[in-house]
Image (cartoon, rainbow, N blue to C red):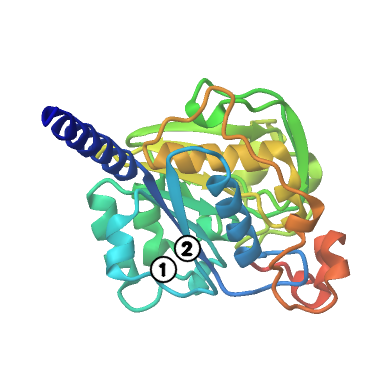
Amino acid sequence: MKSIPKKLTLLAALAFSSLCHAEDAKKNILLLAGKPSHGPGAHEHNAGSLLLKKCLDESGLPVESTVIHNGAWPSAEQLAAADTVVIYCDGGPHHLLLVDDRMQQLAKEMKRGCGLVCLHYGVEIPKDNGGAELLGWMGGYFETNWSVNPHWTADFKSFPQHPVSNGLKPYAMLDEWYFHMRFTEEGKLTHVLSATAPEDTMSRPDGNHSGNPHVRKAVAGGLPQTVAWAFDRPDGGRGFGFTGGHFHKNWGDDNQRKTVLNAILWTAKAEVPAEGVPSKVTPEELAANLDPKGKQSKVDLPHATADPAFCAACKH
């Protein structure tokens, strides 16, 4: 009879050990949201990041996620615990990585194999100040005077055999899809979302974001343009770039969310479900947490109407 409590104690210990192991197996997702910018419904970094967190938390998958808001920077402990870092912010010279020694801090995490996901403007950084780093960590980035940022409807008709493609169905989406990225020749690069850019994407004169002879030749030749890609780094880490995400309302599309949620899991080296990461978003959830930019009823308006002063030049 005395042996029963011992057996119960052993079973309890094993159960506790299994629970701890399950907790340890969870992938840690760190989402860095940039400061507010643009007009209502555009570049909603905080709301978009919180929406992705909500979907991850409700997925039932072994992940835990944290959002750092408004361009703030995580602690060293948070960075060290991350299995992947998701950056959704304004880029170029205003990229949140170009503050103090943040680039060096992130380089330490990349070296240990941490994943990296950059969304929309977050894929752009100056060629001479961060370009080499993003190219090495993510496999590609927006390089001024090479890449372009027109608004167009991309029609995604097929997808490569890759975990990020799991569960995706053909779809078309109007967004500010950057293309003609600068891609690396090292590691393994998979073009996840590609579409043929229409001729009117080249309607603007040449400029550091609007056009150049190289991209004009590619568009005139009908070459498919990649707007989302997955990268297996030579060091074993993983990166993913997604150039959409200008319009917040597009996160209401199941395929767009699935693309990015799948990529987050994949870069964290978690198993992506065969049908992709499941998620649901209500209109109320989509409208939640928007930055205070004025009348949020403008959330559905086109880019140039939502923020005419900024978009007249369209320099980002």
Disc number for residue 142: none
Q: Quadrant of the N terminus?
A: top left
Residue 315 position within the rendered picture, expressed as x and y whole percent measured from the top left: 67, 68
Residue 186 position within the rendered picture, expressed as x and y whole percent measured from the top left: 33, 37
- Drawn side of residue 168 relative to residue 139, left or right: right
Return the residue nearer the eye: 225 or 20.
20
Residue type of the residue flagged with mark 1:
Leu
**Which quadrant holds residue 302?**
bottom right
Q: Quadrant of the C terminus?
A: bottom right
**Which quadrant holds residue 82?**
bottom left
Which residue is disc 1 drawn over? 97
Within 10 Å of disc 1 (Cα), the crowding (few <14, some 14-19, many 20+) is: many
Which residue is disc 2 drawn over? 125
Q: At numbered mark 2, what does the secondary structure look like: helix, strand or loop? A: loop
Q: Is residue 308 visible from the viewing direction of this image? A: yes
Residue at (80, 72) in percent of width and height: 307
Residue at (30, 56) in percent of width and height: 81
- Drawn side of residue 48 relative to residue 28, left or right: right
Q: Is residue 202 visible from the viewing direction of this image? A: no
Q: Is residue 40 above or below residue 3?
A: below
Residue 80 position within the rendered picture, expressed as x and y whole percent measured from the top left: 27, 59
Q: Are marks 2 and 1 in contact (CB under 8 Å)?
A: yes
Residue at (46, 39) in percent of width and height: 265
Instruction: Give the residue furthest to the front.
Output: 1
Residue type of the residue flagged with mark 2:
Ile
Please name which of the two marks, 2 or 1, marks the residue nearer to the observer. Answer: 1
Q: At numbered mark 1, what does the secondary structure look like: helix, strand or loop? A: loop
Q: Earlier in the sequence, mark 2 or mark 1?
A: 1
Residue at (54, 48) in percent of width and height: 57
Instruction: Give the residue furthest to the left.
Output: 2
Labels in figure, total:
2
Q: Is residue 29 above or below residue 227?
A: below
